[in-house]
Structures are given as structure tokens and as C-alpha cells.
Image: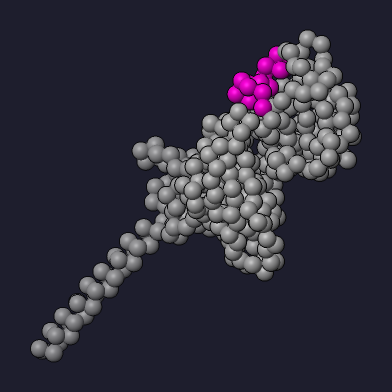
Amino acid sequence: MNRLLQSLQSVKRKAILFALLFIVIGLAYSSSRVIAAPSRAELHVRSSPDAGHESVKVLPSSLLDGATNAGQGPQPASDLYLSIRQAAGNRMLVYIVDALGNLHREDGQILLLRPAARSKLLQEAGQLRARHYGELLPWEEAKRVVPRKANLTVVDLETGLSFNAQRRAGSSHADVQPLTKADSQTMKEIYGGKWSWHRRAILVKANGRTLAASMHGMPHGGDGIPGNGFNGHFCIHFQGSSTHGKGNIDLGHQLMVAKASGTLEPFIGALDPYDTVNAFFLANEYGDRALMRGVFADSLSPQANTRHFGAQEAAIRHLFIAPEDIPDTALTADIPVETCQVRGGRCVNKSVSVFHLGRLSPLDTWRIDSITGSQQ
């Protein structure tokens, strides 16, 4: 009898332990799930975090069924965002979507979708990006789509503002004029009310097609359209087009063409360490957050989210100090750079900084890990 009671008590204790174990497992499992059911999910494509121009598509809220939390990790640079409105408390969550369809929150939390949901998300993202960006055409083809004297519409990829223009000339790129005074005013508004040499990603709409391109905003040269309020022309570049004079392919324009076609990430990924640093200085000059985040390994790092060396107040020049060849097999590179602010035609506030770059393998892409030294 005593043995029976002891046996029953043992069974009871085991039952309690199993129950507690299942409760613990259940709590752990539920904590890795998306607890609050979403009432609405929207996929957004924006060329940069601050872009006012975006393309949006509503997705079924069931997309997140069975999603799990996967800890924390560095936030990728991306043009895809998934906004989720939760029914409970009308709370809005925004995730960055990486190239594999994983979701990243600003606090570093990673959300994994079911394989079928991830495939659906990437399919929808591909279609939405194709609608948002322009065709990547080399200059030899683009100049036939936009022949001389052809009218076209320019859409700024960041603001969404657009104006009408005409290609007037240009053999190595397009020399273009705004059509009317109102078009010139819109173009100036895109540049914050001040003409500028800064390159911007644009879409060129002509002859029923939308092409990826880059423009600057500085009137120069001749060939003005009477009464349009624009003294000269401005330049539009396409993939592989070159500048006046020396006929160089301009890195700034090509970065913006890549941005306008939705291929900025692979374009940056193909750069060598020195051009990666050059791209950093262009992003710093333009105040382009998408480009700045794209050249850093961690897009959430403070250095990837600020302008450097006083670029808000003055133009910055940079010079590589004793540049050396970097072996193809190298996984790290430390590049010293001298910078200065250009004020009144003089170089002032000189400083030296070291750009620390890295990659995981010789087949991987170079990214900036950090910048050290006497940067302003």
C-alpha cells in the first residue's frame, strides 16, 4: 500500500513536472512568435530612408502567420520596407526587408517569415521595384530613345517632383533644357532653391519608356530656350555616358544611375576599396543617406547616419595619402585620407583620418567598418 502511494505520488510529481515543462516550452515558443495579429501590411519601395517619393502595395496580413523572431543582427541597407499595422492598439511597426526576404526592425530584431511567405514577399517586391525604378540602358541605346530635340519628363527619385525638358545636344551624354520658366522653377525646387552640381537620381520618361538616369542642377554653356528662365543647359547621364572635355565616366553620375535603376547595392558591391571611399565622400557631399548607408557594413552605425568633416557648411576635398595596391586576396584595408574644407578658394581645417574597410572573403564586397583619426 505504501509502495502504491509512493508510486502515485511519483507519477503526480512527474505529471506536474511535465506540465511545467510544457508551459515553459509554450512560453518560449510563443515569445518567438509575432504575438499581435496584423490588420494590414504594406510593402514600400523608397530609394532612400527620407525619400518622399515611394511605391506602395497592400499585402495580405496572413503573410506574417507563423513568423518567428530570430534574435538581433546588423541592419542591412535596403530600399524595401514592410509596414505592419496591428489590430491591438492600432500600433504600427516598420521593418526593413533584406535581399533574402527577412525583416529587420530598427532596434536590430530580425523576423523570419515562413518560406512560402518569404517567396511571396520577394515576388511582390520584385514587381513593385520594377514599377518604381527605371530601365538601366547604356548610353548608346538611351540616346536613341531620347534623340536630339526630343521632349522628355524628368522625375526626381527622392522628392517625386517632375518637370518637362528637351534634349538639345550632347554626344557623350544628354545636354538638356527645361521647357518653360515653370519647369525651371520646379528643377530649382528639387535642389532646395539653389543651383548645384550635385548629382541626383532621376527617371527620364520619353517615347513611352522610363529610363534610369542622373542629372546635376547647374546651368552652364549656351543653347538656352528663350523665356525658360534657365541660362544654359544641364547634363543628364545614363549608364556608361561620359563627361565633357576629358570624356571620363563620372562616378557620382554612375552611382545615381544605379540608384535610379534599383541596382545601387550591386554597383557599390563591385567597387574597390578606394572607390568605396570615393563613394563615401560623394554621399557626404550630397547628403545622400541611402548612398552613405550603402558603403558601411552596418547601416545603423552612427558614422553611417551623419555627415562628416563639416560638409554641411563647406565643400570637402579629400586626398589619398600614399595609396598602395591592395591584394585581391586581402580581407581588410586601412586607407589614410587627408581632408580639408574649401573656403574662399582655400583649403582650411586640414585633418587626416583612416578608413577601415573589410569583407568576409575575397568574393565578398568591400564595406567601411569605421573611420578613425582627427575627422571634424
Residue 66 lies in magenta, yes or no?
no
Q: Position of residue 217 (x, y in %)?
A: 70, 27
Quadrant where the N terminus sits is: bottom left
Q: Is residue 43 left or right of residue 28?
A: right
Residue 195 lies in magenta, yes or no?
yes
**In the foreground, 313 or 369:** 313
Residue 154 vertical placement versus 271 (above, below): above
The residue lying furthest to the top in this view is 227
Q: Is residue 165 visible?
A: no
Q: Position of residue 113 (x, y in %)?
A: 52, 55
Give the extent of the magenta segment.
182-196
Looking at the rendered structure, the number of numbered marks drawn on it comes to: 0
Residue 108 vertical placement versus 289 (above, below): below
Q: Position of residue 374 (x, y in %)?
A: 49, 48
The residue lying furthest to the left in this view is 2
Q: Position of residue 368 (x, y in %)?
A: 57, 54
Q: Is residue 300 left or right of residue 245?
A: left
Residue shown at 79%/20% (left/top)? Answer: 232
Residue shown at 59%/50% (left/top)? Answer: 337
The image's colour scheme reads: one colour
**In the foreground, 295 or 106:** 295
Quarter-of-image position of residue 281: top right
**In the foreground, 374 or 19:** 374
Q: Main secondary structure of the magenta part?
A: helix
Residue 204 vertical placement versus 166 (above, below): below
Residue shown at 86%/24% (left/top)? Answer: 168
Residue shown at 67%/69% (left/top)? Answer: 329
Q: Is residue 361 visible?
A: yes
